Image (cartoon, rainbow, N blue to C red):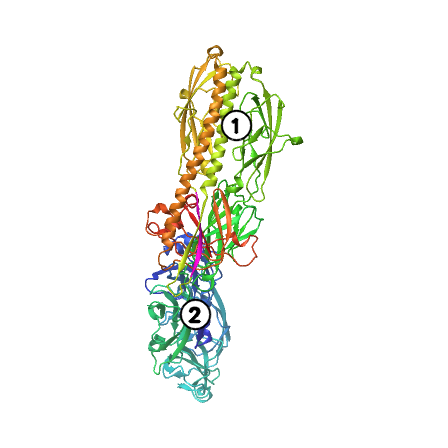
Amino acid sequence: MVLSWRGGSEARSLLLSVLLLAAWESGRGQVHYSVPEEAKHGTFVGRIAQDLGLELAELVPRLFRVASKGRGDLLEVNLQNGILFVNSRIDREELCGRSAECSIHLEVIVDRPLQVFHVEVEVKDINDNPPVFRGEQKLLISESAPLESRFPLEGASDADIGLNSLLTYRLSLNEYFTLKLITKTDKSILPELILRKSLDREEIPELNMLLTALDGGKPQLTESVQIQITILDVNDNAPEFDKPGYKVVLFENVPNGTRIIQLNASDLDEGPNREISYGIRTILPLSEKCMFLINPQTGEIRIYGKLDFEENNEYEIQVNAIDKGIPPMAGHCTVLVEVLDLNDNTPEVMITSLSLPVREDAQVGTVIALISVSDCDSGANGQVTCSLTPPHIPFKLVSTFKNYYSIVLDSVLDRESASNYEVVVTARDGGSPSLSATASVSVEVADVNDNAPAFPQPEYTVFVKENNPPGCHIFTVSARDADAQENALVSYSLVERRVGERALSSYLSVHAESGKVYALQPLDHEELELLQFQVSARDAGVPPLGSNVTLQVFVLDENDNAPALLPPGPGRGPSEVSQVVVRSVGAGHVVAKVRAVDADSGYNAWLSYELQPAAGGSRSPFRVGLYTGEISTTRALDEADAPRQRLLVLVKDHGEPALTATATVLLSLEDSGQAPKASSRALSGAAGAETALVDVNVYLIIAICAVSSLLLLQFQVSARDAGVPPLGSNVTLQVFVLDENDNAPALLPPGPGRGPSEVSQVVVRSVGAGHVVAKVRAVDADSGYNAWLSYELQPAAGGSRSPFRVGLYTGEISTTRALDEADAPRQRLLVLVKDHGEPALTATATVLLSLEDSGQAPKASSRALSGAAGAETALVDVNVYLIIAICAVSSLLVLTLLLYTALRCSAPPSEGACGPVKPRLVCSSAVGSWSYSQERRQRVCSGEGPPKTDLMAFSPCLPASGEDCLNPSSEVRWRGKKDKVGPNRQEQLESRNYSHYKSKGVLIKVMEQ
């Protein structure tokens, strides 16, 4: 705020602490209190907050403050309890002098909304000043003074007012004089001595008496003065004035030395007793400065000083006329001087700014500043009016109380058109000629935070390879704010959420100033394929505004997990497979199976099996399936083959570089006659073979589905112009189809002629704990985690505990204890098969087990062996047909997409169809990730079709610099327009969750030829 003043320094100091009340709606009247002077510090004055209708809790938030004119430290308010109390000593006489009324005017101001209250505290006078005499009084009285002669005495003065200043007098006992009290028009009392007994100078030449003055206060204060009376010889005529009193009216600007009156007194005596000398006995009000002088010879009274109506508008001069007789005699008169006001004081202006700077959204009628004006003159000379300059400004003056104004907003502000106003307030009095003063205030228009930070696009997609170094910079977000100064300062932060069991901030951080996004730890594709989160941009305005941008971080797989061997059965190690083989089996018979899985995805998880050459270079009669892990005979076994065969199977994934694991398979070759007890052993062996083969089928199907789910369709589109000769170029499109969990697990029949959802099996009661009695077989046409199946045994009806359990990932049903006679002969088990997609899909299989004693199945030996072989054959057939079916479906889908895309891209180009860039495109799915360099990126546009088509074009935009820890393919941004499939495609892409991208998206890579 800038204030300029034109006026006296006294007026500025007087009005500096005065806060002027705003418009009528801002004020709520006056509150009156009273307090005695000389009250101690802390004396209670009033509950000002309660009396003003304010709550104690809002005093501090609303900036409750008190200002007073003049002494601002006399009273204070306790903001805790809202009590007004005495802060320092109050001396009424010092504060108001002889004024009959004495008040302290307070202005109470609170904000939000602005309210201004008038509080008047009346200072009550106490009797703290005793009467005061000027000094010892001496009187000269002629002995010839007649009885009842009157001798005026100089009265005492009392600084108090009212009853406390009303004096009465008491004279000490004597035989000559009594005291008479004369009441004047102003109710003051003038003491006079009355002669009651004739004086005899020869008997008593001098009298000494004590005059006591008593005030009207409680307690009553007194003061005494010595009166010395000298009895003179006869000079029995005192001088007398023409009148006992005179009145003179003067303007306050009369020059120094001006004669105001000529007094004349006469004496009836002769000679020296007739000669008179004039003198001023006292001038009221008492002052150290003598304003009048009298000529002792002529009785002429002149001004000695400068009169000021504002300081004192009336004087009382008591004049003595003394003759030169022996003893001299005196006469008395009173001269009353009245001072008239002149327009000799310019108005004073005090401006208190309340709302600077002014927000550009301030409402019309907002109080900008308070103005108080004053003029020490009286009448029309002290009447002040105010005006604003320059014209045509969005402010106006509103009068609130006498000599109080408010500058309020008159129209809407616009900071862009005018950010600052210099407002001049002119105050002019009503004198003739009138006097004026000006003061100015600088009104600054403050910016309003009405623009939130904005990101260039609502969503970004970032591709990051797993196993990144901690602290790696993966992306940078940037937002812009259209406001100014603090309102345009943008800071960035993560929108915190839970990622599984951990907080998002444990994975990522955002630099508050630069917007750089950092990975705090190495990311693991196997643990987290997609990290979707929001970054918030907030400005520094009050209140702050902000917006969010969504980032999708796809963690790309690396071949960092070697194949893991699965145990062939309970109690066996994962790297060793033991199996008994009958020498009578023929060529192509499956005798064992190596089972392995890989935690990676895509090609990194596609496993192949290779039989290591036997020691010594001998040719083994066994081989292993390249992708099945099944160990089968290459010829019929004979006696020449060693009874103990030790095979080493190398399991290798298809990553770069490939990782491997080695399994040891121990085969024991036995003749058919060496197994007479094959009844139970063959039966369990059949179940074991069936279990093993089904396990292999599950993982085989998962691997095949994983490979099939990411079909690569590559084709070219040619563009030719109509010139002569025509020119053209080709572009290559690679279409990848990603899987979603849209297939529930499918149960496989346990054998020929049986339904897929029911498994029946005969179980001998003599089997021990851990014996595999049956197996539930299921496959899932999806890929990756969507095709990973788990098995769960549902609780039996009635809450009874079943003696069976199911393998979590194998589907094998085995005994938990030895069976006994108490177990029901018919066991009905419900097995829930569930995949790992989101949401998970399920299927239910029913297993019927018949418990029989050992003697009830004498022919189980051969039947079990043939059943085992049949199961092997059936499962191999299932694999073949399953692979054929998956390939056929995948090929049909690829050909359909190829034909549809080729037709759309061969159409005439339209707005937003294609645009050149040169980034690297990174494709990610549940089964793998690949990066391709490309010379040119084209957007593939699909026509109006069913929303299921979901053909999307991703426009990568990668950093050119190598400052990031990732290669240039680590980040891809969506750019341009989305395809037009379905209504409001833009919103579909922005709101789609991860599973949608993973399952339905079609990543298209286009290469210019």
Q: Secondary structure at mark 1?
A: loop
Q: Is 623 one of the magenta-colored residues? A: no
Horizontal arrangement in the rendering, residue 339 relative to residue 564 (left or right): left
**Which percent across, then down, holds residue 883?**
45, 36
- In the current view of this chain or complex, which residue is farthest to the right? 616
- In the current view of this chain or complex, which residue is farthest to the top? 855
Q: Nearer the viewer, residue 722 or 134?
A: 722
Mark 1: amino acid:
Gly
Q: Is 737 one of the magenta-colored residues? A: yes
| Label number found at residue 588 | 1
Callout 1 environment at 10 Å: few (<14), some (14 to 19), or many (20+)? some
Q: Secondary structure at mark 2?
A: helix
Callout 2 environment at 10 Å: few (<14), some (14 to 19), or many (20+)? many
Instruction: Please identify the quarter of the rendering in which residue 339 is found.
Output: bottom left
Counting residues from the N terminus, which is met first, the one under dot 2 or under dot 1? 2
- The range drawn in magenta is 728-738
Q: Which residue is mark 2?
A: 15
Mark 2: amino acid:
Leu
Check if mark 2's residue and mark 1's residue have beta carbons within 8 Å. Answer: no
**Which percent across, then down, holds residue 949?**
36, 47
Q: Nearer the viewer, residue 429 or 225?
A: 429
Majority SS type along the magenta span: strand
Where 704 falls versus 811 (above or below)? below
Work out how far the residue at label 2 is from the one at label 1, CA to CA, in angstroms: 114 Å
| Label number found at residue 822 | none
- Please report the residue visible at 51 percent of the width from the left and 23 percent of the height from the top: 688
**Which percent across, then down, holds residue 530?**
48, 45
User: Is residue 455 something one can see in this rendering?
Assistant: no
